[in-house]
Image (tube, rainbow, N blue to C red):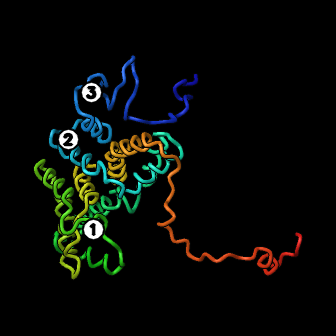
């Protein structure tokens, strides 16, 4: 006799994030109707990613992270990209996609810092090195390889990035300033002790990484949350651009250096390249 269950194909998808059952939507096993009005969007975001309900302190810290990079005027590449896009294609979705695609190694993404922190802490645990000793070693290794330490430096702020400082205060008050955070802070102290580095702060994205790592998020999730945090500002800029109704923004010619402005003789240069006349 053939066992019918054995003949069933394996599941194509496996997911524990949510399911629809008996006319209900269950988010990590919780009825969505209870979540609506039962807790904040920040708490539900934590639930979706971590798979459990957060503590009040965890919500406070995550809420602060989501407020940290709400907007940065027209100095954020993703915002400018979004406004350029919707000036040509007046679509909210097109603008949002452009802003998201501008996130990466040089702007907004905390994941490199998160990986640095996680790897450094794992090394400290594995080797039994003290926080200060490892911090000094990590800075020396980065200098030897001519590598920057992620999360350090800002074009506008010197010594202290006030947004990062506020995040640190909230994380500490929430009881989330643990060994990983202290190690990263020690690395910053070792770095700023070098000649000419005293003015370089931990920036907002670096501090976001610290807090999110202490909250248990993966490096990839930290970037997803950073993108989420910037969306309200991007939506506001796209709406402003759509209301302005200015079609096809371009870079003003006065702001462009086109380099060699010489004109060339196409026919002569084509013959010089070996092409016969008339071909």
- Residue carrying label 2: 59
Which residue is more in the foreground, 20 or 200?
200
Image coordinates for residue 59, horizontal then vertical, percent: 20, 41
66 to 192, vertically: above or below: above
The quadrant in which residue 1 appears is top right
Q: Do the residues labelled 2 and 3 touch (CB within 8 Å)?
A: no
Residue 178 shows which numbered tag?
none
Which callout, 1 or 2, points at the residue further toward the start of the chain?
Answer: 2
SS type, badge 1: loop
Foreground disc of the pair 1, 2: 1
Which residue is more in the foreground, 160 or 29?
160
Residue 153 shows which numbered tag?
1
Which callout, 2 or 3, points at the residue further toward the start of the chain?
Answer: 3
Q: Residues within 10 Å of mark 1 (few under 14, many from 20)?
A: many
Q: Residue at left 33%, top 47%?
A: 230
Image coordinates for residue 52, horizontal then vertical, percent: 26, 37
């Amino acid at each position: 006799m053939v066992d019918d269950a054995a003949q069933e194909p394996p599941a194509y998808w496996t997911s524990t994030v949510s399911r629809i059952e008996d006319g209900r939507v269950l988010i990590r096993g919780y009825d969505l109707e209870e979540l609506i009005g039962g807790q904040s969007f920040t708490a539900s975001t934590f639930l979706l990613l971590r798979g459990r309900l957060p503590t009040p302190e965890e919500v406070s810290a995550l809420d602060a992270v989501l407020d940290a990079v709400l907007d940065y005027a027209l100095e954020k590449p993703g915002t400018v990209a979004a406004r350029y896009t919707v000036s040509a294609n007046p679509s909210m979705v097109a603008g949002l996609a452009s802003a998201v695609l501008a996130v990466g190694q040089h702007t907004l993404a905390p994941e490199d810092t998160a990986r640095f922190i996680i790897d450094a802490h794992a090394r400290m645990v594995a080797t039994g090195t003290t926080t200060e000793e490892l911090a000094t070693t990590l800075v020396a290794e980065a200098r030897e390889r001519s590598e920057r330490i992620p999360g350090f430096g800002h074009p506008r702020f010197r010594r202290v990035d006030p947004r990062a400082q506020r995040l640190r205060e909230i994380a500490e008050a929430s009881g989330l300033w643990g060994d990983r955070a202290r190690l990263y802070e020690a690395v910053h102290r070792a770095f700023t002790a070098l000649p000419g580095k005293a003015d370089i702060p931990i920036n907002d994205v670096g501090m976001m990484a610290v807090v999110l790592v202490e909250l248990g998020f993966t490096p990839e999730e930290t970037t997803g949350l950073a993108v989420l945090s910037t969306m309200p500002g991007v939506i506001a800029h796209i709406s402003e651009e759509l209301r302005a109704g200015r079609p096809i923004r371009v870079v003003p010619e006065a702001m462009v250096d086109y380099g060699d402005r010489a004109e060339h003789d196409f026919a002569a240069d084509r013959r010089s390249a070996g092409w016969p006349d008339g071909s």
